[in-house]
Amino acid sequence: MKLLLMLAALAAAAAGSPPAKSSKAIPARASTAASSRTLFRQFNLTPLWQLHAKKVEAQVMLGCMGAQYRRLELVYEKVRRDGRNPALYYVEGKSRERERILPFRGTITLTAIRKVNPDVRVPGFKALGHYEVKGQFRLTESPAEEGAGVFTGTLAMTFSHKAGGVAYMPAQEEEFGFRSRGEGTTFTSQWTSVAHPKPIKIVWASNFMDIAYTVMDQFYIGDRGMHINPKYARAGWNRYWENDEWWAEAEEPVL
């Protein structure tokens, strides 16, 4: 009897319509990765990092290092996007801490990008879209230099897509001389070397003066306008505005 019931059930299933083919949904993570690859190809971020690529954009980046927040300056003299991987950039440049200038080279690898709505909009600044980028980097100082080390860390970036290309939305001037934070790139790094194996934290940014108060305690003081706290003068912040081209190679005299 049980055998007859099983045969009847199989016959009924065979007579019915064939089972629908299952369509596998694309995982959200795969969809996000595909979108990021498309945007990486669309936007070449070289002009936002390379020194003087656009005079109003990439200039000397400021930052601070160590527990004393010593002033650091850094430039990317050469930036090149990889021909096959649009998320990979090769960079060369120099850093200066006080009178110590060291060349470096390395890579910046972008890991994520997404379109965002900015918290603040600047009147007259017209953009087709605003984007947030995450990434990581490794910069190796020239081993021929005494005390050379390696910068490793992450970057966080916001930029705008304008009709003429990529750009940073500038900071917005507010009352009493205060400024809102504009777009830019922030590099958060650990620096290590054979001579100094204990890691030193370093932060530098294209718009460091707009974000310094988030990195350094009481960097700005005063009720009206922004004035740098005198306690940071010994760390080199009493002359951050000096505009000498310290990264330029000295020209050899013509004989």
Image (spheres, rainbow, N blue to C red):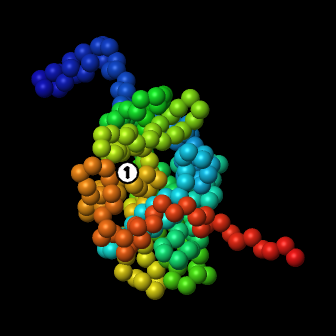
Give, as a three-letter code, the residue at label 1: Asp
Residue 134, position in %: x, y?
A: 41, 49
Q: Is the residue marked by circle 1 packed among few (<14), some (14-19), or many (20+) residues within 10 Å?
A: some
Look at mark 1 in the image and give the residue it sits on.
210
Rendering quarter of residue 18? top left
Q: From the viewer's perspective, tell me whether residue 56 is left or right of residue 216.
A: right
Residue placed most toward the observer, 236 or 156: 236
Query: Going 61% across and 64% down the picture, which residue do you hit?
Result: 245
Q: Is residue 128 visible?
A: yes
Rendering quarter of residue 248? bottom right
Residue placed most toward the observer, 74 or 35: 74
Query: Going 37% across and 24% down the picture, which residue do you hit?
Result: 21
Query: Going 21% across and 20% down the picture, which residue do you hit?
Result: 9
The quarter of the picture where the N terminus appears is top left
Query: Going 34% across and 61% down the picture, which residue do you hit?
Result: 228
**Is label 1 in a helix, a strand or a loop?**
helix
